[in-house]
Image: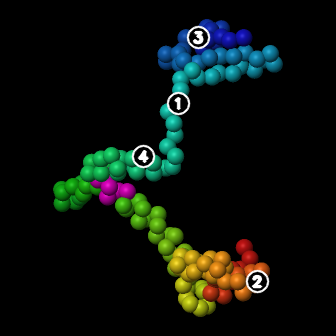
């Protein structure tokens, strides 16, 4: 059985303070009442920075943030500058972790490069004498059990 939000309000003996939302009320046989909005919701952005990315592309030189300095001048950030700063800040912990991990490799003291992985793949495919179950490209790095 379907009813209206206004029906629920009048059945309880009060008038709502705000205009009634566009809500569908469904009374189930077990006594439960379901309220379902008839309004459609806009889609959520795919990620937190989606809106910033959109505006950095659509209007890169538009003002995003302004702050008055002590001398009365304004510090201004555009959408493009803000996106660049956000990318740099978010990349910093990843760079630090990668550097730390690379320094823990006995020899050479770095992580493998993409070209080295490509060369290994080429050898696996082309070398008819290659025989082995485990091929590592890790510079003897052994990760502690986590």
* Mark whose residue sits in front, 1 or 3: 1
Residue 37: in magenta span: no
Q: Earlier in the sequence, mark 1 or mark 4?
A: 1
Q: Earlier in the sequence, mark 4 or mark 2?
A: 4
Within 10 Å of disc 2 (Cα), the crowding (few <14, some 14-19, many 20+) is few
Tell me whether circle 1 and circle 3 mark residues in contact (CB < 8 Å).
no
Query: Which is more toward the observer, 106 or 135?
Result: 135
Tell me whether circle 1 and circle 4 mark residues in contact (CB < 8 Å).
no
Q: Would you place residue 70 above or below residue 11 in this image?
A: below
Q: Marks 1 and 3, Cα distance to the nearest angstrom?
A: 22 Å
To which residue does mark 2 refer?
132
Q: Would you place residue 126 above or below residue 53 in this image?
A: below
Instruction: State the SS at label 2.
Output: loop
Residue 82: in magenta span: yes
Q: Earlier in the sequence, mark 1 or mark 2?
A: 1
Q: Marks 1 and 2, Cα distance to the nearest angstrom?
A: 56 Å
Query: Which quadrant of the figure contains the N terminus?
Result: top right
Q: Earlier in the sequence, mark 3 or mark 2?
A: 3
Percent x, y of residue 69: 23, 58
Tell me whether circle 4 and circle 3 mark residues in contact (CB < 8 Å).
no
Q: Which residues are magenta?
A: 78-83
Within 10 Å of disc 4 (Cα), the crowding (few <14, some 14-19, many 20+) is few
Q: Quadrant of residue 129?
A: bottom right
Instruction: State the SS at label 1.
Output: loop
Q: Marks 4 and 3, Cα distance to the nearest angstrom?
A: 37 Å
To which residue does mark 1 refer?
41
To which residue does mark 3 refer?
6
Within 10 Å of disc 1 (Cα), the crowding (few <14, some 14-19, many 20+) is few
Q: Marks 4 and 2, Cα distance to the nearest angstrom?
A: 50 Å
């Amino acid at each position: 059985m379907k009813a209206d939000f206004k029906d629920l309000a009048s059945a309880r003996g009060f008038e709502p303070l705000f205009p009634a939302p566009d809500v569908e009320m469904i009374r189930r046989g077990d006594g439960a009442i379901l309220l379902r909005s008839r309004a459609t919701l806009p889609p959520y952005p795919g990620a937190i920075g989606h809106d910033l990315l959109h505006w950095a592309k659509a209007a890169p030189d538009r003002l995003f943030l302004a702050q008055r300095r002590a001398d009365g001048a304004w510090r201004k950030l555009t959408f493009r500058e803000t996106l660049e700063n956000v990318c740099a800040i978010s990349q910093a912990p990843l760079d630090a972790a990668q550097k730390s991990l690379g320094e823990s490799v006995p020899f050479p003291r770095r992580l493998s490069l993409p070209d080295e992985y490509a060369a290994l793949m080429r050898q696996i495919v082309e070398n008819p004498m290659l025989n082995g179950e485990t091929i590592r490209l890790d510079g003897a790095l052994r990760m502690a059990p986590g």
